[in-house]
Image (tube, coloured by chain):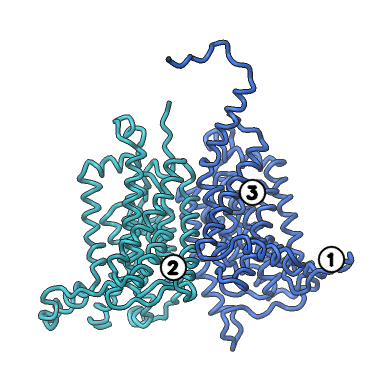
Chain colours: A blue, B cyan
Amino acid sequence: MDVMPKWAEVILVPLISLILAAIISALVILAIGEDPIAAVKLMVSGALGSTYGWGYTLYYATNFMFTGLAVAVAFHARLFNIGGEGQAALGGLGVALACLYIPWPHWSLALLGAIVMAGIFGAIWAAIPAYLQAKRGSHIVITTIMFNFIAASLLNYILVNVLRPRGSMDPATARFPEGTHLPTLHDVLAPFGISFSKAAPANITLLVAVLACVLVWVLIWRTRLGYELRAYGHSESAAKYAGISPFKITMVTMIISGGLAGLMAINNVMGEAERLVLNAVEGAGFIGIAVALMGRSHPFGVFIAAILFGFLYQGGAELALWTTIPRELIVVIQALVILFTGALDNMVRMPLERMFLAARRARTPKPERKPVEPAE
Amino acid sequence: MDFLTLIQLLDSTVRLATPLLLACLAGLFSERAGIFDIGLEGKMLAAAFFSAAVAAVTGSVWLGLLAGIVASLLLSALHGIASITFRGNQLISGVAINFLASGLTVLIAQSWFQQGGRTPSLMGGGRFTPITLPFADAVADVPFVGPIYAELISGHSILVYMAFAAVPLTWFVLFRTRFGLRLRAVGENPAAVDTAGVSVVGLRYAAVAICGVLCGIAGAYLSTALQAGFVKDMSAGRGYIALAALIFAKWRPWYALYATLLFGLFGALETRPDVITALTGMRMQGQLLGALPYIMTVIILAGFVGRANPPRAGGEPYVKER
């Protein structure tokens, strides 16, 4: 069955998909009358040319690590969690409640409290669709899409009618108290003599995200639960035969997935905005799909892909600032990545498999039966 | 609530239900043939943009409609290639198409018109204008029946009548023709269709193409009839509501009409909070009303209100056995 060596599977296929997406993106930039090479240069200098640029790149990457991991964990159990957007929005609500109503003595305790609340709120928002899939047979993709919309309406309602401070016109919560202020990368790196941009929003949540990547790796490949989860993803009937409960796996997987998506709120709500605003997630939940597909659902792949998308996001913002290319270019690139690494995966894979098969045949000694001579 | 308000409310219900109905029937054809399509939203959006753009440049709304259908068909072809030819994941392909449309429309709009990702406002021949049905003016003064005919039934654009005509047409094609029988069979048991010597791939491409045409009309309606021009992300989740309606309708054409009319009514009520207050005597939150179609879909999906069984082979690529 394994036609391709592992390195081709892990590196070559995503790389070719990525190159295809890049070529088409370049064509799009050409078609709207801009220079793709100049655009890439501007993106690189804007996103990676300064610690300020890095600060934004890593800030976005932190968001995408959480949402990417959320999608990846669900993928392992062959569940498509498209509801990261709503789960992250609910996570934001959890963080806001934790920060506003509990007087935290120190940011480290506030961070722990926010992690718990964000995780629980995100997990609940994923657990309902999971329950409905496991017990009532409703399709998780449709339910999680619906829950994105319901979450948007719910947050809109809560921000306008409940959490908005008296006298404020803005549909947002009050600013979080000083005790919940998370150290930025500037604060973290200063003791080591590294001067990092003060203005950039990257903060200590990045370390939480990296830790989450490691823990997800441990969970999936080093625990009994992870084994059950993967077994269920490979074959539901075999897993059932082996005594793995589909109900339990669906619930646990989606709770972990939703919790991870919810954790994103520590970064954008607590770390950056320091209050909960309308539409705080800004599509990061959906980018998680592209990140997970590109990272082949492996935590390390997700880590790399998240940084790449962080770069694209910050670079795209720079492009919108200095050229006539709108920010929506990033949405196009995101779509192309999802298309090539996800839906058109076989288009890249099939010719490659044929190539490797041909190469293997050429290497192995010929069978005794001679190939039929062509007529004439 | 007086009679005239009710007529107005139902009138905007019809207007808002039309794009949902077209998209819902589009999804019906696709999903009945076993191809899940969460890219309805993206196809509508692309069609909305290209219709408005071409109508703005040429001044002809019919050319605009054609351009919208072509744009939607191209995305359908992409979905077909990904999910039929290369047997990719249909859901992921749909997600990609939605983002592709959402990004590309703004990018191209900005490049062509430099108006911040919108098209110029459409005027005159660039829009589908309301059609006054015969005798509408004459009977308008007749009590009860007059206003219903003159205000509610008459005075919509041609696309509205097309959408409503599409319902019996869809029913006829799916349940009274050989093509329809085969199309439904390919969504339930493609292997049987294949054994009978009918091309599974051909049927599925045909279904996806019909889906593209209907989504194209739905998108064109948004930008050239409901509104006068394209604005960023103007489909505003209608593709997803259409999906919800499709499940609500249990993949049946007539139920699709009722479901989209119901969701259209929610949309109409959302813009008239005064009516709700008058009816129920309490203030209803606009957000709750906006979320109602989604909440109802979840409840229906969970099987609390009758069971909704999707086509059995839906979402699975067909692999010929060798």
Amino acid at pointer 1: Leu
- On screen, residue B189 versus residue A306, left or right, reads left
Q: Which residue is mark 2?
A: B236
Could you tell me which residue is drawn at 65 percent across and 41 percent down? A10
- On screen, residue B159 versus residue A165, left or right, reads left
Name the foreground residue: B195 vs A349.
A349
Amino acid at pointer 2: Ala
- The secondary element bearing badge 3 is classed as loop
- On screen, residue B300 versus residue B141, left or right, reads right
Residue A295 marker: 3
Crowd class of label 2 (few under 14; some 14 to 19; many from 20; radius 10 Å): few
Q: Is residue B242 visible?
A: yes
Name the foreground residue: B193 vs A369.
A369
Q: Earlier in the sequence, mark 1 or mark 3?
A: 1
Q: Is residue B21 visible?
A: no
Name the foreground residue: A300 vs A50.
A50
Give a yes or no on whether discs 1 and 3 share a subunit: yes
| Picture quarter with the N terminus of chain A | top right
Name the foreground residue: B317 vs A180.
B317
The x, y position of residue B176, in whole percent, is: 20, 45
The x, y position of residue B181, in whole percent, is: 26, 41
Q: Which residue is mark 1?
A: A189
